[in-house]
Amino acid sequence: MLKRFLSYYKPHKFMFTLDMIASLLVSVIGIFYPIITRAMLNDYVPNQKYDLIVLFGAVLLGLYFVKMLLNYFIQYQGHMIGVKMQARMRSDMFRHLQTLPYKFYDNHETGKIMSRMTNDLNDISELAHHGPENILISSISIVASFIYLATINLYLTLIIFACVPILLVISFIVRGKMRSAFMESRKAVAEINASLESSVSGIRVTKAFTNVDTEIEKFEKGNKSFVNARKKAYKAMGTFHSSTTLVTEVFNVVVLIAGGLFLYANKIGLGDYTAFIVSINVFLAPVRQLIMFMEQYQNGVTGFKRFTEIMDAISETDKDTAKDLVDVKGNITFKNVTYGYGEEKDVLLDFSMDIKNGEKFALVGPSGGGKTTVCHLIPRFYQVEKGNILIDGVDINDVTMLSLRKNIGIVQQDVYLFNASIKDNILYGNPNATEEEVIKAAKRANIHDYVLTLEKGYDTIIGERGVKLSGGQKQRLSIARVFLKNPPILILDEATSALDNTTEILIQDALDDLCHGRTTIVVAHRLSTIKNADRIAVIDGGKIIEEGKHEELLERKGKYAELYNLQFKNL
């Protein structure tokens, strides 16, 4: 994992090197104060060398001015290195998320993914900046202070440094507890974000069902879990800080007692003893810095671990021998396909069907029978492992996903629109389309006239998920998007089931135009919408139990006739 983390420094090697040099110089400047202090106590003051007192005082001021500039560089450029690394990780994660299969999103909430991309990466950025600096500055300062203190009195220095192993042992013991506590805290934050994202997205449903109290209760449950998780983290952190602080405070006591005994035994002069007491802070400061760094380290490490969990999720992949699907006619064949979601029972069982080029093929049947699963398998949203799906005689597993999906248009019941303009949402079907092509697609979808009534026309922002549009308008916008894509294969998955009858008739005209000249698979609960289909298949229990035209299926008085009569018995 360390090698993986360090790889993100590569594009910033030059600036990182300058940052480390600046940090090194800051450490070196830090040692000058005790050196000059000792010289003044032992030489300049007793011997009344006032010119040297002023000179070295001025030198010290000059060094501190240089240190100020170096610290500015470290804080600015160092943080920018961290931010750029964070941005690259965020880009890598976002790109990787685009390659992950539907199964990943079935098992991971949006809010939790967002938490990993924001909170976790922010802590990684801080570690990326402060980590190397703190380690370098502290290490050099500790070594330099040891050498300098040893020049004052070696034995007294060895006594002080004998306390360091105690500090290391305490750090090692408590560090494990901190790691697990901070990981639990991360998960709690992700839970809150997921709950918040879900509640805000569903605020209209919450208000409609007057379930505000329920949502507050759910959120507070997650909030309480967060408090408990942070409690454990801060308890571990408190144990760490209080223990290590005690050890560093003991250093001062040891210096005071041991130095006093050395002074009493004439093993050290008063000037050196005073300088040693002043200089011990040169050693204690980097030790404290390392102690403070441990919290940041745990935050960054747990954040990076959660980042790698996303990055290690298996992407959708093509075979090495996969070829582009070209010149698609639209013949679709299912051969003995068996499929289930995870550990659930199989939704499709030895499923076979054959759809001819340009045919309008309808799938009907009870909920859970496998209709939507068929629609998801054709574009390879889920991977078929048992059986084969062929387009124009070519197995879809042998072609690239990009070329496969470019040739398939999908209109679903749950339309997703982006918080962008009407034009941008239509352009999603073909980003390279001209304005004339956008308008033509809108006209064919019967939404152009409505767009013209808007003050900003095609530049009107429609809000999150198209909240400013009606259900019918959203559906027509999604149809315009598919018109612009112009695919040879079309899948209509419950495209009009959420609409009222009047709106459905308007949408149906646009859909009929859209279906013309394309192989179309229609999934519908409203059987009135698929009367004119070339063929209708009834799916139940993962298999096709009936197949034929509308009139033929009614005459058989089987499952289709039963479903049809149930829908129209009161009409």
Image (cartoon, rainbow, N blue to C red):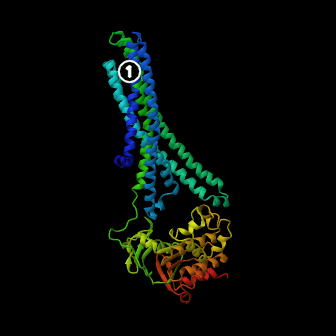
Q: Is residue 124 above or below residue 363?
A: above
| Residue 181 appears in view | no
Query: Observer-nearest residue: 393 or 493?
Result: 393
Q: In the picture, residue 511 is in which quadrant? A: bottom right
Give the residue type that dot 1 points to.
Ile
Query: Observer-nearest residue: 219 or 302?
Result: 302
Query: Observer-nearest residue: 310 or 370?
Result: 310
Mark 1 residue crowding within 10 angstroms, few (<14) / some (14–19) / many (20+) = some
- x and y, in percent, of residue 547 in the image: 49, 85
- x and y, in percent, of residue 248 in the image: 42, 26
Q: In the picture, residue 275 is in which quadrant? A: top left
Q: Residue at x 53, y 74 (%)?
A: 484
Q: Is residue 457 above or below residue 55?
A: below
Viewport quadrant of the C terminus: bottom right
Q: In the picture, residue 318 is in which quadrant? A: bottom left
- x and y, in percent, of residue 193 in the image: 54, 51
Horizontal arrangement in the rendering, residue 217 relative to residue 534 (left or right): right
| Residue 232 appears in view | yes
Q: Is residue 49 above or below residue 291?
A: above
- Label 1, secondary structure: give it: helix
> How many numbered circles does the render carry?
1
Quickly name the residue at label 1: 35
- x and y, in percent, of residue 541 in the image: 48, 75
